[in-house]
Amino acid sequence: MSSMIAVCVKNRPYSYETADVSNINVMLNNNDVSDYLKISPTGLEARCDASSFESVRCTYCVSSGVWYYEVTLLTAGVMQIGLATKDSKFLNHEGYGIGDDEFFVCL
């Protein structure tokens, strides 16, 4: 299992402020999301005001090659970020979300 290290660069602009996202065709999937997670109209931001672990998949399936994504955390709190297969269980009321079953890839 690998670990993820957060790197903060002082005064670095956020990618969403500087990148042209007009041609992005991969986003958070509003049709494959757990109960209390709110997805922005652009599909690039998620917010949860509940105390449960909510989950969402994106609109693109990765099956080979090398891929990466960026995440900007705007609030504090306990979060699990990683890659989930289509078989991952999003059962937030039962305590299952990203990272809680055998179908998760830890980053």
Image (tube, grey):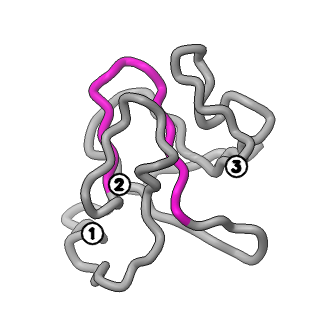
Can you name the residue that lies furthest to the front here?
A: 31
Q: Which mark is residue 72?
A: 2
Residue appearing at x 28%, y 63% in the figure: 42
> Going from the N terminus, do you reach mark 1 or mark 3 first?
1
Residue appearing at x 37%, y 36% in the figure: 37
- Few, some or many residues within 10 Å of mark 2 (<14, 14–19, 20+): few
Would you place residue 31 above or below residue 59 in this image? above
Mark 3: amino acid: Lys
Q: Dot 2 lies on which element?
A: loop
Location of residue 8 in the rendering, given as x and y in whole percent from the top left corner: 35, 56
Residue 57 forms part of the magenta stretch = yes
Report the front residue among 61 and 17: 61
Describe residue 56's horizontal placement relative to residue 90 as left or right: left
Residue appearing at x 37%, y 18% in the figure: 51
User: How far is the residue under mark 2 from the one under mark 1?
Assistant: 9 Å
Would you place residue 87 above or below residue 22 in this image? above
> Going from the N terminus, do you reach mark 2 or mark 1 first?
1
Q: Dot 3 lies on which element?
A: loop
Location of residue 54 in the rendering, given as x and y in whole percent from the top left corner: 46, 31
Q: Quadrant of residue 65?
A: bottom right
Q: Quadrant of residue 78?
A: top left
Mark 2: amino acid: Thr
Which of the two discs, 3 and 2, sits closer to the camera?
A: 3
User: Which residue matches tag 3?
Assistant: 86
Describe residue 51's horizontal placement relative to residue 92 as left or right: left
Q: Which residues are magenta?
A: 45-59
| Dominant secondary structure, magenta | loop
User: Which residue matches tag 1?
Assistant: 16
Q: Quadrant of residue 50?
A: top left
